[in-house]
Amino acid sequence: MTRTHLVTGAGSGIGALLAERLLERGDAVVLTARSEARAHDLRADLPGAEVLVADLADPAAVEALGPRLPDRLDSVVHAAGVVDLGPVAELSAAAWQEQLAVNLVAPALLTRAALPALRSARGTVVLVNSGAGLSAHPTWSAYAASKHGLKALADALRGEEQDAGVRVTTVYPGRTATPMQEKVHRQEGKEYDAAAWIDPATVVATILHVVDLPGDATIPDVTLRPTP
């Protein structure tokens, strides 16, 4: 039976490379795109993938995906994320709301919609978190809060769904050489050197290991850090 995976954040970085790897090995892949224009680009970049349109910042749009999901899902990988740094004294309500909506609320709602399909396949939920989901530093309050919340979501979901055979893994990558990391460096006012950080392929290899893990074990959490 062909394995089927739902991946968010496939427009770039970790999500894009993961979708590419899954398609290369013959798995079925369902992606999300924030607009019809972006969906057109994804279909061109990742031939063979099914692309559903939903802006992850819009809870109603995320919930509307439910009836369009496959009947079986071997995994749901939440790789989408947004970041906007700034001190608490300066961060706008919009910056807080967008990061919480995309990084936390969307994974919760999309996972809820996908649970029947995950239970049917005894599938795996993978939440791509961040080192910021374990500790928060100055100017990272909103992003870190969303990622701390994502950890809580994973921990609660893991206990709730274990009897249904659904496994839940949180991956905590340190700084990874993605477009998001390049944006972070600009916001921090630092020079960006991709070679200094984790290769996205390394994170993808970790996710694939989790998704392919035999059914007799689970990996609740895995942390990756750049090699000094």
Image (cartoon, helix red, strand yellow):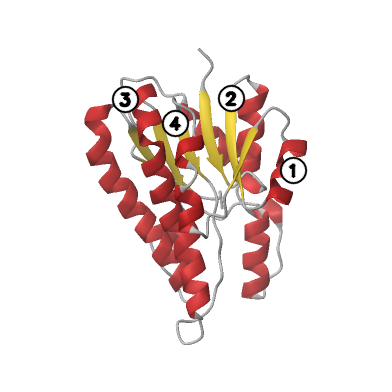
Residue found 46% across the figure and 37% down from its top: 67
* Residue 44, x across and y down, in percent: 77, 37
Residue 222 seen in this snapshot: no
Observer-side mark, 2 or 3, equals: 2
Residue 210 picture quarter = top left
Q: Secondary structure at mark 4?
A: helix
Decide: few, some or many residues near mark 2? Use Cα within 10 Å; few <14, some 14-19, many ≥20: some
Amino acid type assigned to the residue bearing label 2 in the image: Ala
Amino acid type assigned to the residue bearing label 4 in the image: Val
Q: Secondary structure at mark 1?
A: helix
The front one of 140 and 79 is 79
- Counting residues from the start of the chain, the first of labels 2 and 3 encountered is 2
Q: Which residue is mark 4?
A: 210
- Counting residues from the start of the chain, the first of labels 4 and 1 encountered is 1
Amino acid type assigned to the residue bearing label 1 in the image: His
Disc 4 to disc 1, how far (Cα)? 30 Å
Amino acid type assigned to the residue bearing label 3 in the image: Ala
Disc 1 to disc 3, how far (Cα)? 38 Å
